[in-house]
Image (spheres, helix red, strand yellow):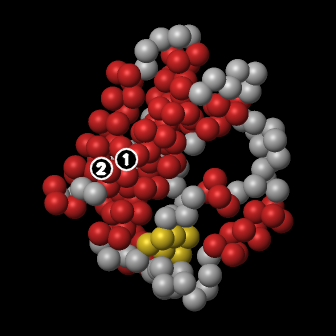
Amino acid sequence: MKTANAVKNMTEIVCNNIDGPLVIIVSAMGKTTNALEAILEEKRNGNNVGERLKLLEKYHLDICNDLFEEKELSIKADLDAIFVDLIRVLEHDISGIEDALYDKVVSFGEILSSSIIAAYLNKRNVNCALLDARELIVTDNSFKEGKVQWEHTNSKIRKAIRPNNDSKAEV
């Protein structure tokens, strides 16, 4: 999903088809992953990434402005916190573990999109719980190409998604 209209369309589909608990898995919006890769490359080259970060933040805020009224924009605080975390990750020197840094940085695309989509679903009265895949999916230590450890992952997901949970949707 790369636009507010795409989020609205997905929400209509969800609202018209909820028949019980539903899990929604989202990816980064638009070209966010590409933008994060470019930010990481610029940072590795010793360049200032402030302008690129501002453009990425503006892109997500523009989507929020189309989805929410001004009084509903508590999502902005969430996005601010996500960008503070992203900046913190970019400032850490983990030389020698560049693939780990790559994985951390590009995951922010999904963090941003899932936060926006969960907030919008809740706005539309779809009782939605935001679950963080970083807490649920277990992989081996092969950065950039991690292999999911399915048994452990499935166990964590089953514990997080309870059949009697009050949420109708989980993102």
| Badge 2 amino acid | Lys
Q: Which residue is mark 2?
A: 76
Q: CA distance from mark 2 to mark 1?
A: 5 Å
Of residue 83 and residue 162, the one placed in the foreground of this image is: 83
Residue that carries the numbered disc 1 in the rendered image:
79
Front-lying residue, 40 or 46: 46
Disc 2 crowd rating (10 Å Cα; few below 14, some 14-19, many 20+) is some
The residue nearer to you, when weighing 118 against 79, is 79
Q: Secondary structure at mark 2?
A: helix
In-image side of 90 versus 82 (left or right): right
Image x and y of residue 108, in percent: 52, 42
For the point 75% across and 36% down, which residue is it? 143
Q: Secondary structure at mark 1?
A: helix
- Asked if residue 84 is positioned above or below residue 147 in the image, the reply reads above
Residue 62 position, x and y percent, is: 26, 43
User: Residue sitting at 75 percent across and 21 percent down?
Assistant: 96
Q: Quadrant of residue 163?
A: bottom right
Q: Residue shown at 43%/38% (left/top)? A: 84
Single out the residue that lies furthest toward the bottom.
Answer: 164
The kind of residue on which mark 1 rests is: Leu
Instruction: Examine the rendering and report whether any part of residue 40 can be seen.
Output: yes
Evaluate if marks 2 and 1 touch, with contact meaning CB atoms under 8 Å apart.
Answer: yes
> What residue is drawn where x is 53% and y is 10%?
46
Residue 58 locus on image (x, y percent) = 29, 36
